[in-house]
Amino acid sequence: MPKQSLHHAFPKASQYDPEWVRKHSMGENVLFNLESLTKSLQLKPGMRVLDLGCGKAISSIFLAMEFGVTVWAVDEAVSASDNYQRILSEGCEDKVFPLEMEARSLPFPEEYFDAVIVVDSYTYFGTDEKYLPYIARFIKPEGHIAIVDVCFTKEIDTPEQAPEFLREDYQNYWYFIHTIDWWRKLWEKTGLVQIEAAEQLQEAELVREQYIKDYEKEDEPDAFAKALKSDDQKFITFFKLIGQRTGKTAYLQSYK
C-alpha cells in the first residue's frame, strides 16, 4: 500500500503553520492526533465541547475553527491568560473559553457537554477507575467521550517485562501506559458508555515519524522521541477510544 502524505492523511491540520503547531504542541503534533480522532466523531456547529487537558489550547482553536463548536479549554498546567491570548490572536474568543483547573475538580453542570475530548493527556488521570464515572456526569445522554493517546501493543505487568529500551524511564513515565484492550475493559465495566471505537490510529505511523523528525531538530533530548526511534518492534503506538454515554445516572457526586 502506498504511503500516505501528511496532507492526504490530515487535510485540516496540514493547513496550519507547522512551526506554530510545533511550538504549541506539548508532545507529538496535537492537531494530527486530534484530526484522526475527529474522523470518528460527528461534531456539529453549536455543540458544547470540553477540551480537557488542552495544553496550549491549539486543539480548542482547531475544534472551533474546523467544526464551529463552542469549546471550554481546560488545563491545570498552562495559564488561562496565556491561552486566552492565543485564542484572541486566532479570532476565536467567542468560541473558545480558557479555564485553568484540575481534571478532578470541574465546575460544570451535569449533562452540559455534547462531547468531552482529551488529546494526549487522559493517561495522566484517567487510569483511575473512578474517573470515567466522574467525567461522565458532565456529558449529555448519547453524548460522547473521545480520547486519543499513546498505548502499548502488549500489556506490561511488571518492570521486568518492559522492553530494554524503555527500562531507563519506565518508573518515571511508562508504568501507566496500557494496551487498547486494557482501556476498553476499564470503560466497559462501568456500564456508563457504549464503546464506539477502540483502535489504533490509522495514521499512527505518520504521527510516529513526524514526532521523531520534529525532535531531531530540538537542542534538548526528548525521552519519548528517543523511545519511538528505538522501538523497532512498534511496541509503542497511538490509539483512539470513543464511548457514547448511556442513560445511566448513578454517577459519583464528587471525586474522592
Image: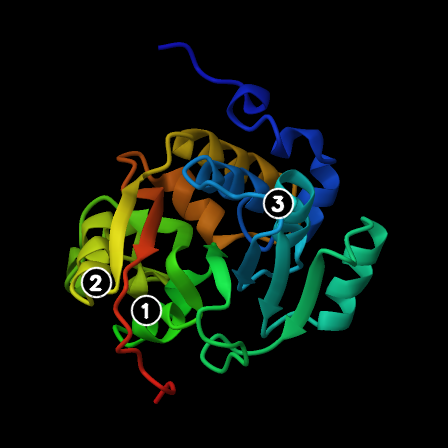
Residue at the spot of label 1: 132
How far apart, in angstroms, are the residues tagged by discs 3 and 2?
31 Å
Vertical position of residue 62 compared to residue 234: above or below: below
Q: Give the residue displayed 49% in from the left and 82% down from the top.
A: 105
Camera-nearest residue between 194 and 27: 194
Image location (x, y in percent) of residue 30: 56, 46
Vertical position of residue 63 compared to residue 246: above or below: above
Q: Give the residue displayed 36% in from the left and 45% down from the top.
A: 240
Say if mark 1 contacts mark 2, CB within 8 Å.
Answer: yes
Image location (x, y in percent) of residue 9: 51, 24
How far apart, in angstroms, are the residues tagged by discs 1 and 2?
9 Å
Vertical position of residue 39 compared to residue 133: above or below: above
Residue at the spot of label 2: 186
Query: Badge 3, how many Cα within 10 Å: few under 14, some, many 20+?
Result: few
Q: Is residue 153 visible?
A: yes
Residue at the spot of label 3: 45
Mark 2 element type: helix
Q: Amino acid at mark 1?
A: Leu
Query: Badge 1, how many Cα within 10 Å: few under 14, some, many 20+?
Result: many
Q: Amino acid at mark 2?
A: Leu
Camera-nearest residue between 162 and 4: 4
Q: Give the residue displayed 53% in from the left and 18% down from the top.
A: 5
> In which quadrant will I find the N terminus?
top left
Vertical position of residue 79 compared to residue 4: above or below: below
| Residue 79 appears left or right of 151 | right
Mark 1 element type: helix
Question: Which of pointers 3 and 1 lies earlier in the amino acid sequence?
Answer: 3
Q: Amino acid at mark 3?
A: Pro
| Residue 8 appears left or right of 167 | right
How far apart, in angstroms, are the residues tagged by discs 3 and 1?
26 Å
> In which quadrant will I find the C terminus?
bottom left
